[in-house]
Image (tube, grey):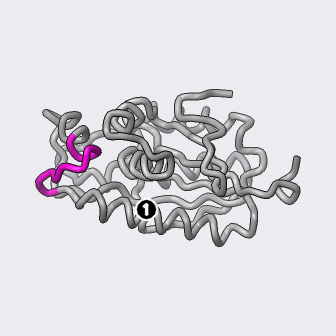
Amino acid sequence: MSSAERRSVRLYLVRHAAVTVRRGLPSPQWHLSPEGRAAAKAMAEESCWAELAVIYASPEPKAVGTAQRIAARHGLTIRLEHDLREVERRSWVEEGYREQVRRYLAGEPVDSWEPRETALGRVRACIDGIVAASGGQDVAAVSHGLVLTLYMTDRLALNAEASYELWQAIGFPDVAIVDAQARRVERGFGARD
């Protein structure tokens, strides 16, 4: 079935590949690691991308690097979208990070993190706008684990524990495919061709 025959837009939600952590740089400036570049290239080889029309990406280098590998393999255009950026945090600390994420996804404030509802509103409006402007074509949003989890949690009405489990399950890189209008997951994070 071609995109024109389908009534619904397929939305590809893509988490960036693994990064090289550079403690002296803020996390929005981190780039893909050699392993991350290889994994993004391998993911781009999967058959699921066949009907994708355009890729939107967070401007962060790790998201752009992931999007570039998909775009290069399939001859697609990348459009940068500032509101696909990760949850804003003044600092990133590895120790205790998972517990901070658990609290954040449960709706508790985490010191120096963008308020949950602000991040959700931003990414929801951005992705909904991408889908609305798609002209019925399949589109991808290459972004980050926390904001993609917020978006999926909202769309699927997940509780806090299910939201945290979803976040833990998203790989580096990973893709979920969603029927945008029906809000139905066609391919969950962690699935492979």
Task: Return the x and y of residue 162 as percentages of the image width and height.
Answer: 38, 34
| Highlighted magenta segment, given as a residue range | 103-112
Label 1 crowd (10 A; few <14 / some 14-19 / many >=20): many
Say which residue appears at 74% left-offset and 69% top-offset: 135
Task: Return the x and y of residue 161 as percentages of the image width and height.
Answer: 32, 34
Task: Return the x and y of residue 191 as percentages of the image width and height.
Answer: 59, 28
In the image, residue 127 above or below residue 17: below
Q: Is residue 183 left or right of residue 164?
A: right
In the image, residue 47 above or below residue 75: above
Nearest the viewer among 41 and 154 is 154
Task: Return the x and y of residue 137 as percentages of the image width and height.
Answer: 74, 61
Residue located farthest toward the left when viewing the structure as drawn: 111
Say which residue appears at 13% left-offset and 33% top-offset: 95
Whether residue 149 is visible here, answered yes or no, is yes
Q: Quadrant of residue 158?
A: top left
Dot 1 lies on which element?
helix
Asked if the stretch drawn in magenta spans residue 105, the answer is yes
Q: Quadrant of residue 3?
A: bottom right
Q: Is residue 78 left or right of residue 66?
A: right
Residue type, mark 1 in image: Val
Q: Which residue is mark 1?
A: 123
Magenta stretch mostly in which secondary structure? loop
Say which residue appears at 71% left-offset and 44% top-offset: 49
Whether residue 71 is visible here, answered yes or no, is no
